Amino acid sequence: MTVSSVLVVGGGITGCVTAIALAQRGVEVTLVERSPQWHGVGHGITVQGNALKEFREIGALDPILEKGHGFDQVRMREADGEEIVTITVARTGGSDLPATMGALRSDIQDVLVGMIRDLGIEVRLGTELVSFSSVDRHVEAELSSGVVENYDVIIAADGIKSTTRKLLGIHEEKKPTGMGIWRSVVPRTRDMSISGLYYHGPEYKVGFTPISDDLCYAYVLTKPERPDNGLTDAQEMRRLLEGYGGDVPFIRDQITEETFLNFQPIEWLYVEGPWHRGRVIAIGDAVHACPPLIAQGAAQCSEDAVLLADYLTREGDIEALLTEFEARRKPRVKLVVDASLQLVEWELHPDAPGADPGGLFASSLQSLAEPA
Ligand SMILES: Cc1cc2nc3c(=O)[nH]c(=O)nc-3n(C[C@H](O)[C@H](O)[C@H](O)COP(=O)(O)OP(=O)(O)OC[C@H]3O[C@@H](n4cnc5c(N)ncnc54)[C@H](O)[C@@H]3O)c2cc1C
């Protein structure tokens, strides 16, 4: 095998799936994670079928699906609740997997972390990569713990705020989209069993994804700055949901001061230039973070992870394999980033000529039904 030892930097979805896929192929993996505690946050996430396919590839699908809620349709509505269209979403992971799954991020993370422990992968929490340099046929990694070690390859999966990106000499940086998002997890009714999206209301968009038999992940796409209006988070999210019909009044009524809420501006990144230098490569959000308008972040990260593990365990020159991997991934990732940015544009300017969010959403997912 070309590669026998790998350092994975970052323990989010990308780093976890990469570490598992490599270890399952017999590679000795060390994973360093900056955070001293390693747990997923309690938000919901909408995961498309092509992510589920990669979870199945590493044997994580069944426990993840057991915790989440799979479905095949998205209902688009006017702000008052009137239906615009119900789209049957392409099954991007294959005909035997649901088109979409809603879940708690922490549930997905727990399954992946459990597998990492079962595989005996060495994990060092509270540890970062400080610097690296090429040494003969290895790369030398200096860690924040003071340890210096040699690896065959370093994989940076340290997210949109990646520091390894800079160490790699990549100067592209994350950019604002002009939008912010409020997120919450609240009870749902039995009828809210597919995703719902509400357009043409006071905010850019309101939506929800069912994540279990009785919970949903609800969100509001709004301005990127939180107004200084003296309201608590719960009061602010309830205010933003005013003026919507359909299922939204029910969601609004569920939000209390105890509800776990989060606001953040939405940013994006796509690195056009090389993702690797020598034996060090960045993948996942560290090089392509798409606004979550077609919910492809986890899918593109997981596809990177499984495919990179495949390339690195082929015979051949490592740098040539990394170049081939990158060339294969970039067109697909670019399609997702471009479509997501176009959708942002249409959310910001819904009256733009030719605006067709439903059409673009459906056609993008149709293209992604092709293998990664
Ligand atoms: C508001 C929002 C909503 C989203 N909704 C969805 C959705 O519904 N569906 C979907 O598919 N995608 C969604 N996404 C995108 C998705 O969350 C990301 O694509 C995905 O989580 C990125 O995973 P990652 O592992 O590459 O990065 P991250 O999740 O950022 O993980 C990086 C990890 O690296 C660690 N780290 C950072 N720096 C270092 C360092 N120097 N050394 C060691 N460790 C380090 C961090 O602590 C972290 O654990 C959303 C994104 C946002 C911002």
Image (cartoon, grey):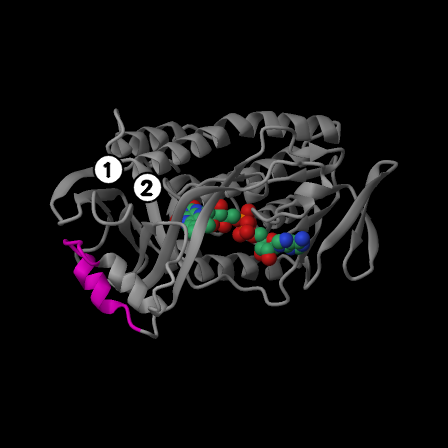
| Residue found 14% across the figure and 54% down from its top | 245
Task: Identify the mark at residue 221; answer none if there is no mark.
Answer: none
Instruction: Determine if the C-beta at disc 2 is less than 8 A from ligand 1.
Output: no
Judge the density around disc 1: few (<14), some (14-19), many (≥20) Cα neighbours within 10 Å: few
Amino acid of disc 2: Ala
Query: Which label is found at residue 88?
Result: 1
The part of the image, by quadrant, that contains residue 77 is: top left
Dot 2 corresponds to which residue? 99
> Mark 2 vs mark 1: which is more N-terminal?
1
Q: Are marks 2 and 1 in contact (CB under 8 Å)?
A: yes
Vertical comparison of 188 with 346: above or below: below
Q: Secondary structure at mark 2?
A: loop
**Which one is in front, 340 or 138?**
340
* Quarter of the view holding residue 307: top right
Residue 313 showing in the rendered view: no
- Residue 190, position as x, y percentages in the image: 18, 60
Residue 112 visible? The answer is: yes
Q: Which residues are magenta?
A: 242-256
Q: Residues within 10 Å of mark 2 (few under 14, many from 20)?
A: many
Q: Is residue 148 above or below residue 54?
A: below
The amino acid marked with disc number 1 is Thr
Q: Where residue 89 sits: x, y (%)?
A: 28, 37
**Where 237 falls versus 158 (above or below)?**
below
